[in-house]
């Protein structure tokens, strides 16, 4: 493996963080490195903790030697204590927001979502936490769209997992995103973790590139994710980036490797897959909800990216026992 190419993942050691989840995630990601191609990158895990009265946390553990890379993800583990309060979370909030602005994915497990909530980044975002915390979470973060029926919600730059043991699901999602589906499946098999619902490599969720370093483009990506790409008109996107349209298009394609049209189609198809799997809405209604006024055009775009029609996708992956494809 190429140790010079590392993908840096940080684990947040806030007071009360569950050590079993911290060490378990560290081991799971280290195991995944064993199955990565020799010429490919390795996952590098760092533990970040506040030392004394310093304003920013420091790395207190590093799983690999070598030069540090920009953080690709920061994960807030669960706690066996009460969820972190606003005062305790304040020490972490700006640091998390900073790395999110730089392109890092933010994730949480169980009550770790409360620390993410204090950053303000969960407003109008669909997230999950442990069902026992639902009422408290909704009181503290009323603008977040909480869905505690879901074990894990991957919203691109924000990924949240439900119960305290859901760190295994989040860990496999990280492996899938950064090293690919085949490495994830081998990791799950070696650790005897049930990968049910994850062995669908060509249906896997769209993982937008966020670590490209273009702050203007990243701002638009976060805005599209938060608004579910409902308004994709070029003047609107360029205005979000505060760039001229032609300059914005050039920089967007350079940063993401995609045109704005393809990027937004992928976001919409990802949202449609979730609705097909977790709701009984008709294909026509889902097409409308994700921004398509023509259901026929939606079906063509969906098949191009997923390899299945919406009805076939629902038949294979619907969460209910007797889905009715339409």
Image (cartoon, rainbow, N blue to C red):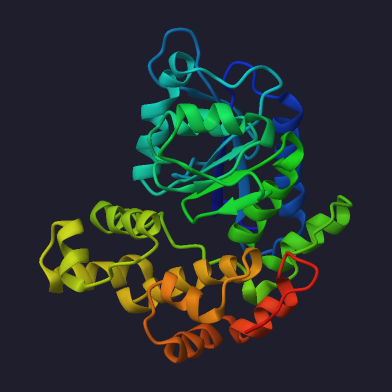
Is 159 positioned to the left or the right of 196 in the image? left
x and y percent of residue 282 in the render? 56, 77
> Which residue is at a point 59% across and 34% down the rendered structure image?
46
x and y percent of residue 295 in the render? 45, 86
> Which residue is at a point 59% across and 43% down the rendered structure image?
128
Numbered label tally: 0
Q: Nearer the viewer, residue 293 or 304?
A: 293
Q: Residue furthest top?
A: 52
Q: Is residue 185 visible to the viewer in this orientation of the structure?
A: yes
x and y percent of residue 122 in the render? 43, 41
Viewport quadrant of the N terminus: bottom right
Is 20 positioned to the left or the right of 309 in the image? right
Q: Is residue 47 visible to the viewer in this orientation of the structure?
A: no
**In the rendered image, the vertical position of residue 315 relative to residue 167, given as above or below:** below
Viewport quadrant of the C terminus: bottom right
**In the rendered image, the vertical position of residue 110 relative to residue 101, given as above or below:** above
**In the rendered image, the vertical position of residue 291 relative to residue 119, given as above or below:** below
Q: Nearer the viewer, residue 182 or 286?
A: 286
> Which residue is at a point 62% across and 38% down the rendered structure image?
129
Q: Quadrant of residue 63?
A: top right
x and y percent of residue 240 in the render? 20, 57
Q: Quadrant of residue 131?
A: top right
Is 305 positioned to the left or the right of 294 in the image? right
Q: Residue furthest left?
A: 244
> Which residue is at a point 75% across and 45% down the rendered structure image?
168
């Amino acid at each position: 493996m190429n140790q010079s190419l590392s993908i840096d993942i940080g684990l947040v050691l806030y007071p009360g963080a569950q050590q079993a989840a911290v060490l378990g995630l560290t081991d799971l990601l280290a195991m995944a490195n064993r199955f990565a191609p020799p010429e490919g990158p390795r996952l590098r895990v760092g533990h970040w903790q506040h030392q004394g009265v310093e304003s920013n946390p420091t790395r207190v553990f590093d799983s690999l030697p070598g030069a540090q890379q920009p953080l690709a993800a920061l994960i807030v583990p669960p706690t066996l204590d009460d969820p972190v309060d606003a005062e305790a979370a304040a020490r972490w909030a700006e640091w998390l927001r900073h790395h999110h602005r730089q392109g890092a994915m933010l994730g949480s497990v169980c009550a770790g979502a409360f620390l993410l909530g204090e950053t303000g980044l969960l407003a109008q975002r669909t997230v999950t936490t442990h069902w026992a915390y639902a009422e408290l979470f909704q009181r503290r973060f009323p603008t977040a769209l909480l869905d505690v029926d879901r074990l894990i919600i991957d919203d691109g730059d924000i990924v949240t997992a439900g119960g305290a043991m859901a760190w295994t699901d989040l860990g496999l999602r990280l492996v899938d995103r950064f090293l690919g589906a085949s490495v994830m499946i081998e990791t799950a098999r070696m650790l005897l973790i049930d990968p049910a619902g994850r062995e669908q490599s060509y249906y896997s969720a769209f993982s937008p590139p966020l670590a490209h370093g273009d702050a203007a483009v990243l701002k638009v990506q976060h805005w599209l994710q938060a608004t579910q790409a409902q308004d994709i008109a070029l003047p609107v996107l360029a205005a979000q980036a505060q760039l001229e349209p032609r300059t914005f298009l050039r920089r967007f394609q350079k940063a993401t490797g995609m045109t704005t049209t393809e990027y937004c189609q992928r976001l919409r198809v990802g949202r449609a897959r979730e609705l097909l799997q977790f709701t009984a809405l008709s294909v026509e209604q889902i097409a409308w909800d994700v921004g398509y006024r023509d259901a026929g055009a939606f079906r063509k775009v969906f098949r191009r990216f997923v390899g299945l029609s919406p009805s076939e996708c629902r038949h294979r992956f619907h969460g209910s026992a007797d889905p009715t494809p339409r």
